[in-house]
Image (cartoon, grey):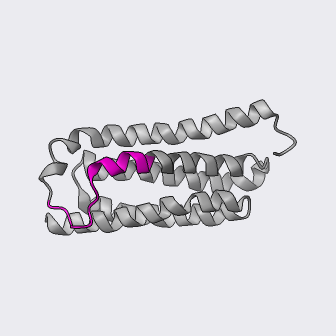
Amino acid sequence: MHESKSRGHQILGLLGWLALCYAAAGVGSWATFASLTDWYPTLIKPAFNPPNQIFGPVWSVLYFCMGLAAWLVWRTGKSRLWRGPLLLFLAQLGLNVLWSVLFFGLHRPDLAAAEIFVLLLTIAATAWSFWRFSRAAALLLAPYLLWVGFAAALNVAIWQLNR
């Protein structure tokens, strides 16, 4: 733990990063919810599409890992240096929400397919920038990067099957 931040400050910081990530999850879920009962079930999906029940638990774990990763970088106390990596983190979090809005909210898998590749690059850049502060933080983003890569393949397949 960095000496300039008290234990209480550390705990509040962790809770803040987790709250931010779960708030993004909430906005994404809000954009997704209505489409899960009316639009999404009508789409043709590829054989590798997982059951809908998988997505909630997977995303819950991934958002926890994302918040923990951001906190590990933030807690180093090197604010002049971690501003860029944490801004990248916030950018990828915003892109994460935007994907839900594009795909589910606007029913635009074509735009979502383009956007998810920008999201993938931003997650990779975030993990790379986190590496110099905390290898654990960078590694915590690896499952997220893999899952979004899978989601990108799924997104493109759904778009192609439903033109």
Magenta residues (range): 44-59
Q: Position of residue 44 (x, y in %)?
A: 14, 61
**Residue 49 lies in the magenta-colored region:** yes
**Quadrant of the image containing the C terminus:** bottom left
In the figure, residue 132 lies in which quadrant?
A: bottom right
From the viewer's perspective, is residue 160 above or below residue 41?
Answer: below
From the viewer's perspective, is residue 47 above or below residue 43?
Answer: below
| Residue at (29% x, 43% y) in the render | 32
In the figure, residue 29 lies in which quadrant?
A: top left
Q: Position of residue 22 (x, y in %)?
A: 49, 39
**Residue 155 lies in the magenta-colored region:** no
10 sits left or right of 105 in the view: right
Furthest toward the right, the residue is 3
Q: Which residue is at the front of the view, 45 or 103?
A: 45
| Residue at (67% x, 46% y) in the render | 71
| Residue at (38% x, 50% y) in the render | 98
| Residue at (78% x, 50% y) in the render | 76
- Numbered label tally: 0
From the viewer's perspective, is residue 117 above or below residue 58?
Answer: below
Q: Position of residue 120 (x, y in %)?
A: 46, 65
**Quadrant of the image containing the N terminus:** top right
131 sits left or right of 106 in the view: right
Q: Which residue is at the front of the view, 84 or 42?
A: 42
